Image: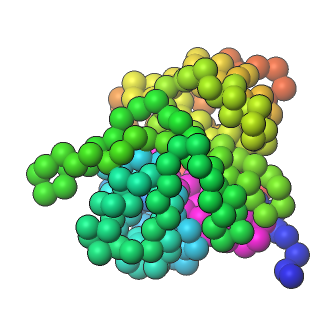
């Protein structure tokens, strides 16, 4: 067995991330690449991908899902309705699931959890129902556990997510308007009991007013914020 490497996170802007897991898997979350104003051109084609996670079927999270699946052949983990829509496009390599359930894929333990938001996708001029939005708890090969909230309001069961899965790192939206803002996202860190947080869904366009500076100022004592620039990778 290969030795484990360090988990790394590359933010591609907005809600899109590229993770490299301790086992060397490249995991893409919410592929919004070419049309994403924050995504550096170097990442418009993400290269080799082992797994794609989709939190919900809004265009700013799945606009490049089909093209990425076709280019990489990577399996897609998403809620049932998103997988059904993918099936209607001829994509068969999906891992449909729903909230509360877990799957073991590529050596990762992936649990789908709640998110408070909406989800629909305009497909050929018609708004298609894409199931409910979700978050993911992912336990990596070395046991490190991350919580990807997706687009969401704050909700009380974040405390339950903290108790059940004890995430080490949370990926939380802070942009306000469509998701939590800095104030509620900071409060969410307390509910989750995390010590590290990566802000997302901010800075993409003018409507998203929440900033890492405002977020950091409100964080509970002892919580470290890792604010990445688009294209930047954590150490
Ligand atoms: Ni959304
Ligand atoms: Mn969004």
Q: Quadrant of the N terminus?
A: bottom right
Taking depth in this image into account, of 214 and 62 the one nearest to the observer is 62
- In the rendered image, residue 95, in percent from the top left (x then y), is placed at 50, 64
Q: How many marks?
A: 0
Q: Residue furthest bottom?
A: 1
Q: Which residues are magenta?
A: 10-30
Q: Is residue 164 magenta?
A: no
Q: Is residue 158 above or below residue 106?
A: above
What residue is rendered at 38% in x and 61% in y? 83
Q: Is residue 135 visible?
A: no
**Residue 143 position by quadrant:** bottom right
Q: Residue furthest left?
A: 125
Q: Is residue 15 left or right of residue 67?
A: right
Indicate how the structure is coloured in the image: rainbow
- In the rendered image, residue 149, in percent from the top left (x then y), is placed at 57, 39
What residue is rendered at 62% in x and 41% in y? 171
């Amino acid at each position: 067995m290969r030795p484990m490497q360090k988990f790394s996170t590359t933010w591609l802007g907005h809600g899109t991330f590229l993770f490299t897991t301790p086992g060397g898997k490249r995991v893409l979350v919410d592929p919004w690449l070419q049309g994403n104003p924050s995504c550096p051109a170097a990442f418009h084609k993400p290269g080799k991908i082992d797994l794609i996670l989709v939190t919900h079927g809004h265009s700013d999270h799945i606009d490049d899902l089909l093209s990425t699946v076709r280019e990489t052949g990577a399996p897609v983990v998403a809620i049932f309705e998103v997988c059904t829509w993918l099936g209607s496009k001829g994509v068969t390599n999906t891992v449909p699931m729903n909230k509360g359930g877990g799957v073991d894929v590529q050596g990762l333990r992936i649990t789908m959890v709640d998110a408070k938001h909406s989800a629909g996708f305009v497909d050929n001029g018609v708004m298609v129902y894409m199931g409910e939005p979700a978050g993911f708890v992912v336990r990596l090969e070395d046991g490190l556990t991350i919580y990807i909230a997706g687009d969401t309001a704050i909700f009380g069961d974040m405390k339950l997510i903290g108790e059940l899965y004890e995430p080490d790192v949370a990926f939380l939206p802070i942009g306000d308007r469509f998701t939590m803002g800095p104030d509620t996202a900071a409060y969410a860190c307390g509910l989750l009991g995390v010590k590290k947080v990566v802000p997302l869904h901010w800075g993409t366009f003018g409507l998203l007013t929440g900033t890492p500076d405002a977020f950091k100022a409100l964080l509970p004592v002892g919580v470290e914020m890792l604010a990445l620039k688009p294209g930047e990778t954590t150490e």
